[in-house]
Image (cartoon, rainbow, N blue to C red):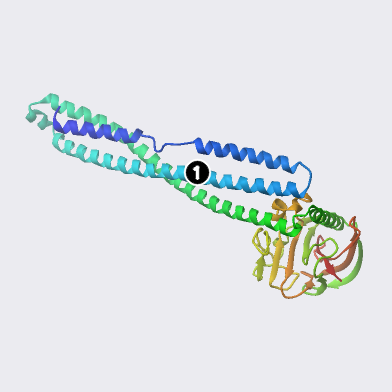
Amino acid sequence: MPRLIKKLVLIFFVTIFFAIQPAYGQDQGKLDELNRQIEEYTKQIAKLKSQATTLANEIAQFDAKIRLTELKIDQTQEQIALLGGRINQLEISLDNLSAAFNSRVEETYKMIRIDDSPILFLISGNVNEAVSKFHYLKKIQEADKKLLDRLGAAKTTYTEQKGEFEELEKLLARQKVDLDLQKAAKANLLAITRNDEKRYQELLNAARAEFEAIQAIIAGRADETEVGRVNAGDRIASIIQGPSCNSSGTHLHFIVSKNGSTENPFNYLRPGVEYRNCSGPGECSEGDPFNPSGSWEWPINPPVRFSQGYGRTWAVQNSWVGRIYNFHNGIDINSDSSSEVKSVSSGVLYRGSFAGSAGCRLRYVRVRHDSGDISTYYLHINY
């Protein structure tokens, strides 16, 4: 077979070889073992949650959650390593495919230039050679479209996996933050309980009494007295400084209720206020989003210290309060400049209190706003 045809056939098979090579190799062993351990610790945490509520059990849960997060970090890192290897091999395969394909196109072009005239078939004196060249040319051209399709698919896969790689890196960063917060939460629990079971049970009882009282107040079972009309910004109460009835420390529990159901206060409070987000563990770390988007003025003077959000908060998911309730029905805030509490909008002011199972009377004020179906509650205050 002439040298040109041999070269063309060689290029054809080299290109096919690169086209059918797998883009990557996978070693699933380590990843499978990590998945098994993650499943094991997930079951262990569920089992611990069903057991008696003790400080030892709470610490065991923290240890299991910390180990679970560490395993998830290892899992994500392994996925990143595997995917990185796939992407590198895809880059090599794409480069080889492109180079081989371009080389074959060049040789095909040379053959067309040599054999594009019927006269050359006669001049060559070797009809068999010309027919053979034409035969291989047609075969290779038929493969071109398939190879181009494969090349396009490989490029699409490469783009998708690059995006997946970037998402895994973001997930890894979030998991590392979660791990730090969980370790800080465990340290915080040991600090405030002084590793004492009695102190832990006292914290649980206080949280339980507060939750029961707040639920009763929202349900309308408290004693209330109408005071009169107030406007937005009018002083209506002051925050109790230090621990008080059903409160472990200084803060305002602010609730928005519409037709008897609580709503996220951040949907009503205006953005742009100066604040510190201390809704995570320890002295002041971020746990819940601070994202006001409404038009109401704030019930306290800035700068605002934010200690718990609305809904499935960080504290609900990671601290002992999750033993008492699974949904926080307001936000907990405090002012770094003043104890004054103000009405967020105009309406009718009520003063109320509720005597709960803890043997104390929780005081609050409520403003029934002019819209009629919305009330705001301000708890842990003095009139």
x, y percentage for residue 107? 20, 38
Residue at the image point whose x is 17% and y is 31% from the top: 5
User: What percent of the width, then of the height, locates residue 346?
Assistant: 80, 70
Which residue is at the front of the view, 376 or 145? 376
Q: Residue at (29%, 31%) from the top-left corner?
A: 142
Q: In the rendered image, which quarter contains the C terminus?
A: bottom right
- Work out whether residue 67 or residue 374 is closer to the camera in this orientation and state it: 67
Q: Which amino acid type corresponds to the residue marked 1 in the rendered image?
A: Glu
Q: How crowded is mark 1: few (under 14 residues within 10 Å), some or many (20 or more)?
A: some
Q: In this view, does 63 lie to the left or right of 156?
A: right
- The N terminus: image quadrant: top left
Query: Residue 228 sits in which quadrant?
Result: bottom right
Q: Is residue 286 above or below residue 137?
A: below
As drawn, 105 above or below 122: below
Q: Identify the residue shown where x is 55% and y is 47%.
A: 73
Horizontally, residue 61 falls left or right of residue 109, namely: right
165 or 142: which is nearer to us?
165
Query: In the rendered image, which quarter is residue 95 located in?
Result: top left
Residue located beneath label 1 in the image: 78
Give the residue drawn at x 51%, y 46%.
77
Describe the element under mark 1 as helix, strand or loop. Answer: helix
What count of labels does the image hold?
1
Where is residue 28 shown, x and y percent of the image?
49, 36
The quadrant where residue 365 appears: bottom right
